[in-house]
């Protein structure tokens, strides 16, 4: 479990780096509200993005995005509603998933693949 938490944190860090390099502005990391958690809240131009990061070693058990089930989607939607209620200046939003494949090594976290799925699901 410890290795999973460590790789998850590294995955989120790599996702943030990727998003910033792609021109996103990171507003929040690990945003928690009303029993919901959103890994990353960022803007892509004038679009507010609620982003779930899933980190896996490989695809042996399917794509990482498959772990974003209905329950997780509902929690993200709840968190997004709370966020938008407190930040009414945003009118356009979407839900993305970033899949990070890689593993923790002595030299750090080695990413073998990163996939950004825009509009992964709708509210």
Image (cartoon, helix red, strand yellow):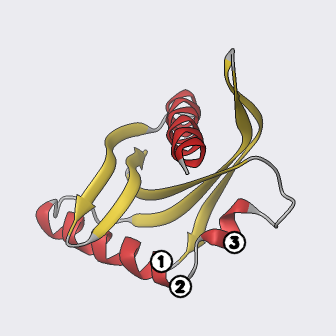
Q: Nearer the viewer, residue 74 or 3?
A: 3
Label 1 residue SS? helix
Residue at 69% over, 71% down? 66
Residue at 37% over, 76% down? 75
**Mark before the other along the chain sequence, 3 or 1:** 3
Q: Quadrant of residue 74?
A: bottom left
> Residue 39's spot in the image, x, y percent?
42, 53
Q: Are marks 2 and 1 in contact (CB under 8 Å)?
A: yes
Residue identifier under label 2? 70
Residue at 58% over, 59% down? 97
108 versus 31 height, above or below: above
Pick out the residue farthest to the front: 1
Label 3 residue SS? helix
Distance between mark 3 and mark 1 Cα atoms: 11 Å
Disc 1: CA contacts within 10 A as few (<14), some (14-19) or many (>=20): some
Residue at 20% over, 72% down? 34
80 versus 108 height, above or below: below
Q: Quadrant of residue 86?
A: bottom left
């Amino acid at each position: 479990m410890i290795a999973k938490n460590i790789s998850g944190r590294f995955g989120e860090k790599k996702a943030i780096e990727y998003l910033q390099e792609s021109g996103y502005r990171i507003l929040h990391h690990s945003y928690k509200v009303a029993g919901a958690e959103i890994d990353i809240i960022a803007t892509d131009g004038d679009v507010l993005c609620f982003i779930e990061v899933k980190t896996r070693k490989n695809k042996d058990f399917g794509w990482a995005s498959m772990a974003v089930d209905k329950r997780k989607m509902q929690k993200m939607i709840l968190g997004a509603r709370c966020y938008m209620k407190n930040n009414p200046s945003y009118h356009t939003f979407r839900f993305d998933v970033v899949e990070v494949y890689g593993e923790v090594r002595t030299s750090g976290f080695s990413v073998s693949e990163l996939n950004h799925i825009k509009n992964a699901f709708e509210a």
